[in-house]
C-alpha cells in the first residue's frame, strides 16, 4: 500500500510551493508520486471546480457548496487517489477533508458533524496518513493572494470569514487527531520544507 499525504491551510499559506518541493524531494528518493488538488484532479472534478470557484456565483447556497465539494472529492478518490494508493504510490493532495470541515463546517457554520457525515459517503475509508497544516494569519494570507492573482469566489470572502478559517484550522489541532501536524507558515520557504520533510520521513520510517 502507498501513502496518502494532504496539505492544508488558509488561502495564501503557500501549499502549492511546498507540494512542488516535496514532490521533487520524494522523486529523488525513488518514490512514485501522484500530485492532485481539491476541488479538481479529474476531468469531472475540475468541471465542478469551475462552478464552485466562479466569482459570479455569489448566490450559491452553503449546502450546495458543501455537496459540490464532496462530489468533486468522491470522483477524485474513486478515479485517482484509491487506485494510486493500492498501486503503492505516494499521493500528495492540495486540500482534502479538513478543508470542508473548516470552510463549510466551521467558517460557514454548518457544523463539523454534518461535514463528516456527508463526506463518509464521498471518501469511505480513504483518510490521509499525514495532514500538514501550514498555519498563517488570515490578513497575511489574503494579501499574498492579492499580490499573486485575481481572487476566486472563496478568496473574495470577507476578512472575518478568512479569520474563521484560520481559527478553524487551529481548532483542529486541539481535537487529538495525531495525523494533523502544524507548520509555521511565517517561516522562510526552505525552513517550512525542511519541517515537512521531517514529518514525511517520520511517516515513511513508521
Image (cartoon, grey):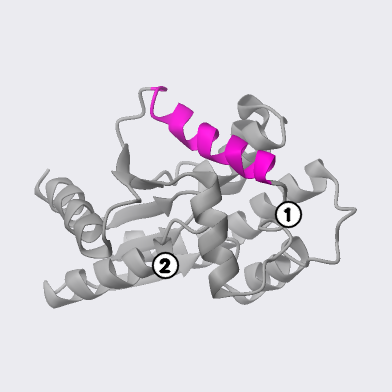
Q: Residue placed at 25% from the left, 66% from the top?
A: 22
Residue, disc 2? 16
Residue, disc 1? 68
Q: Residues within 10 Å of mark 2 (few under 14, many from 20)?
A: some
Q: Residue placed at 20% from the left, 75% from the top?
A: 27
Q: Does 44 appear above or below 123?
A: below
- Tag of residue 130: none
Query: Which quarter shows the N terminus?
Result: bottom left
Viewer-nearest of discs 1 and 2: 2
Do we see residue 129 in this rendering?
A: no
Chief secondary structure of the magenta portion: helix
* Label 1: element kind: helix
**In this picture, residue 156 sits left or right of residue 165:** right
Gap in Å between the C-alphas at discs 1 and 2?
A: 22 Å
Observer-nearest residue: 158 or 130?
Answer: 158
Magenta stretch in the rendered image:
159-175
Q: Residue placed at 74% from the left, 60% from the top?
A: 153
Q: Does 41 appear above or below 203?
A: below
Q: Residue placed at 64% from the left, 59% from the top?
A: 72
**In the image, residue 165 lies in the stretch drawn in magenta:** yes
First reached walking from the N terminus: tag 1 or tag 2: 2
Amino acid at each position: 500500500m502507498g501513502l496518502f499525504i494532504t496539505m492544508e491551510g488558509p488561502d495564501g499559506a503557500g501549499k502549492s510551493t511546498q507540494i512542488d518541493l516535496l514532490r521533487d524531494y520524494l522523486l529523488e528518493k525513488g518514490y512514485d508520486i501522484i500530485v492532485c488538488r481539491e476541488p479538481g484532479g479529474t476531468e469531472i472534478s475540475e468541471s465542478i471546480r469551475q462552478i464552485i470557484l466562479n466569482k459570479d456565483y455569489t448566490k450559491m447556497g452553503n449546502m450546495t457548496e458543501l455537496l459540490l465539494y464532496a462530489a468533486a472529492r468522491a470522483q477524485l478518490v474513486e478515479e485517482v487517489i484509491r487506485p494510486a494508493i493500492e498501486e503503492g504510490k505516494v499521493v500528495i493532495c492540495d486540500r482534502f477533508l479538513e478543508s470542508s470541515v473548516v470552510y463549510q463546517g466551521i467558517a460557514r457554520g454548518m457544523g463539523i458533524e454534518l461535514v463528516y457525515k456527508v463526506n463518509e459517503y464521498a471518501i469511505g475509508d480513504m483518510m490521509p496518513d499525514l495532514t500538514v497544516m501550514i498555519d498563517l494569519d488570515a490578513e497575511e494570507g489574503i494579501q499574498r493572494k492579492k499580490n499573486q492573482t485575481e481572487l476566486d469566489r472563496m478568496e473574495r470572502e470577507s476578512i472575518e470569514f478568512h479569520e474563521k478559517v484560520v481559527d478553524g484550522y487551529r481548532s483542529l489541532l486541539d481535537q487529538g487527531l495525531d495525523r494533523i501536524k502544524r507548520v509555521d507558515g511565517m517561516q522562510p520557504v526552505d525552513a517550512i520544507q525542511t519541517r515537512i520533510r521531517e514529518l514525511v520521513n517520520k511517516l515513511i520510517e513508521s
